[in-house]
Image (tube, coloured by chain):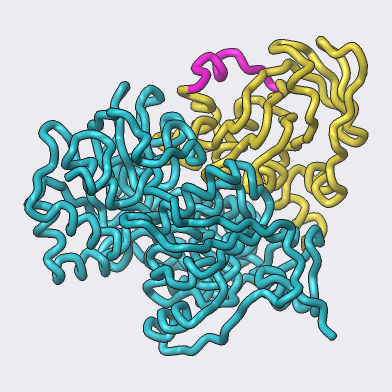
Amino acid sequence: MKLNGRVWKFNDNIDTDVIIPASFLNTSDREELGRHCFAYLRPDFTRNVKTGDIIVAGRNFGCGSSREHAPLALKEAGVRLIIAKSFARIFYRNAFNIGLPLLESEEVQDRVSEGDRISVDLLSGEITGGSLEKALFARPIPDFMMEIVRSGGLVKYIKEKGTF
Amino acid sequence: MDTPMTMTEKILAAHAGIDRVVPGELIKVNVDIALANDITAPLAIGVFNEIGKEEVFDPEKVALVADHFVPNKDIASAEQAKMMREFAMGKRVRHYYELAEGGIEHVIMPEKGLVMPGEVVIGADSHTCTYGALGAFASGVGSTDLGVILSTGKIWIKVPSTIKIQYEGKLKPWVGGKDLILFTLGKLGVEGANYKAVEFSGEVVRNLPMDHRFTMANMAVECGAKNGIFEVDEMIINYVSKVTGRSPKELRSDSGAGFEQVLTISVDNIEPQVAFPHSPDNVCPVSKVDNILLDQVFIGSCTNGRLDDLRIAAKILKGRSVAKGLRLIIIPGSSNIYKKAIQEGLIETLVEAGAVIGPPCCGPCLGGHMGVLASGERALSTSNRNFRGRMGHPDSEVYLANPALAAASAVLGRIGSPDEL
């Protein structure tokens, strides 16, 4: 599974409150959530994000509240992959559960630039393109999580397999 | 001989139907009670419907609590609450609570005896970890996981390794569970226990009242922990027996159990702590806090909205007045606590001092309603998070502290200690 997209860079400890502030949590409508992604932190995000874009961040991405509205808002806005140095536990589960893959890499954030167009092989974890002089390798996605991604999320996985 | 296990490992093994588990192992666990609120339930109900089961796995083992945006703040939130209410009625969910019957989910679950020591509690709310104070394995998840639990009664979990934290020494005046956990966050950092279990132990916590233990377990997630847990001692057994009439067994980690790390914290010199914006681990002892003027003080939330918290606030505010221009918002964590606070005369004391009392709910903690901050405003809150924009405008600031400091600061008009009054 290969992905290709533009990079949006973020720092450490991006919490789910800044991804989707609580004042927008009075709905479960995915499109509506997508319209308010990073509403206050980066008001330009929803105007300029394109389907297929990739978020590259530092440590502990998605910390704080368990709101699944956060990965849903990112996915709805067009984000197709997040690469971070590390992810907070609940966000990690939530993102895979809705079919939004995550990759962990200590190096990518330090080596790519905002707006770079990078190519990522989800299976091998190989990342190339943009400001990268040579390929970087993210930690491979665990098999179980990869199967969920292939199905398009946990619900579809369960419907396909009859169990989980 | 049996391999020694930690408390968390024992509970997970028992609920996976196997003799032992090791950290890192992926297991499927039976859930004793599943929980969601008016923000997370609607998405979970969508997942449940998509999976296509007619009934929830066990209507006795599901709790749905309207607490985040109630009394409903707008039409959209009213629709969300209505959807959850109708689902609860339609599926005969046993534990559905709102307003007069309820309060904040993490306050009422223990109060109503819905959590027993040694159980597995999974909730679509990050502060589900609160029930570790009862010696349960309690962990927060998102709505898809919760929707799958509603359908199947099961969840997959990676067995966490455990960090054991031992608190030794003697507590200073005005120092309680909130200060211990804030100090610990300062040591571990917001990612310090990511994916891990945190076991709170040592002579200090053995003597710590339940309300303080709830505060500590509640904030385990602020260092990324999967769960925080206390050993099931006499205090927990007494609390649970009183509420439920059932007598749980003692439960603790085996001697020789494998802890990833054992951290000993001497509490002798720990002062009341203040977490500065914009992170709960950005802590500072109160004596080192400069002249930080406040617009608002909030006493409440699943962290510090319990009876002991209101008692200490009333003790400090009795016969005093809130500083001119400062807004003091106090929200009892449940209707039950509200009633007791009235009976004890606490509410009268608080109102006399200049506080406004809100109906039991999450209130301004998450910046939804009932005390949202404007740009440039500063609040001291007894809640658990002070992320940028958490309580309102992205250019507002939130400081976290215990209820004693919050009450004293409301009188002083700036962050300070009761000793300064």
Q: Which residues are magenta?
A: A41-52
Q: Which chain is yellow?
A: A
Q: Horizontal placement of B406 versus A149: left or right?
A: left
Name the residue: 53% across, 86% down.
B248
Q: Horizontal placement of B324 versus B256: left or right?
A: left
Q: Residue B389: image x %, image y %?
A: 41, 30
Which quarter of the image is occupied by the N terminus of chain A? top right
- The answer to which of A24 and B87 lies nearer the viewer is A24
Image vertical order of residue B255 relative to residue A108, above or below: below
Q: Which chain is cyan?
A: B
Quarter of the image for residue B337 reads bottom left
Image vertical order of residue B32 relative to residue B420, above or below: below
Query: Magenta stretch: residue A42 in it?
Result: yes
Name the residue: 88% across, 18% down.
A128
Name the residue: 60% across, 13% down.
A48
Q: Residue B392: image x %, image y %?
A: 35, 31
Name the residue: 59% across, 50% down.
B142
Image vertical order of residue B236 relative to residue B82, above or below: below
